[in-house]
Amino acid sequence: GMYNKYLIDIYIGEENFEEAKRLAEIEVMNRPTPATYDWLAWTHYKSGELDLAVDLYKNSIEGETYEPDVIYHMGVVYQSANENRGAEYLQESMDASYELGPLVELEIKKKIKG
């Protein structure tokens, strides 16, 4: 299970959302942390289930962590749902973009510009 985070990312990239969700749900059951809930919410978002992702961020993640990758994901999801806080979280993740890497930094800049 120690590689599930990376496997979830791979499955999302391959658009194998069912397998990504299955692993994320296992992780939430085993370790219900903001990070594992983020993996599940991000999987829902990437598979087109925006409402489920927003609900997870609002009810299980928001205000519980300051991890840059979680904040970035939350910003993307909220912006997609036309939530005002999306821009705020994207800017916050931009402030920590050195931890996220140059490719994510470019994505954040694009999303901030609209």
Image (spheres, grey):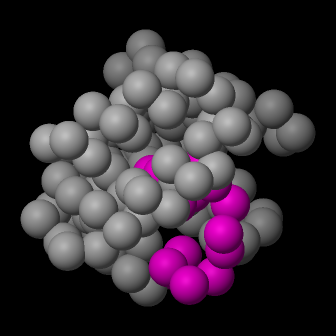
x, y percent for residue 39: 56, 51
Q: Which quadrant would the N terminus be assigned to in this image? A: top right
Residue in the picture at 49% in, 32% down: 105
Residue furthest right as drawn: 2
Count of numbered circles in the view:
0
Viewer-side residue, 67 vs 102: 102
**112 displayed left or right of 18:** left
The quadrant in which residue 55 appears is bottom left
- Of all residues, the one furthest to the top in this rendering is 14
Residue numbers of the magenta segment: 60-73
Viewer-proximal residue among 72 and 3: 72
Query: Picture coordinates of residue 83 (x, y %)?
Result: 18, 72
Q: Is residue 83 above or below residue 87?
A: below
Residue under the image location 20 percent in, 41 percent down: 113
Q: Is residue 74 magenta?
A: no
Residue occupying image coordinates x 78% and y 67%: 31
In the drawing, does residue 102 fall left or right of residue 48?
A: right
Q: Does any portion of residue 107 appear in the rendered image?
A: yes
Residue 40 in sight in this render = no
Name the image quarter holding the C terminus: top left
Q: Is residue 65 magenta?
A: yes
Judging depth in this view, the residue of 109 and 22 nearest the camera is 109
Residue 63 to residue 70: above or below? below
Q: Horizontal and vertical percent for residue 71?
A: 52, 60
**Which residue sits at x=57%, y=29%?**
9
Counting from the top left corner in percent of width and height, residue 8 is at: 59, 33
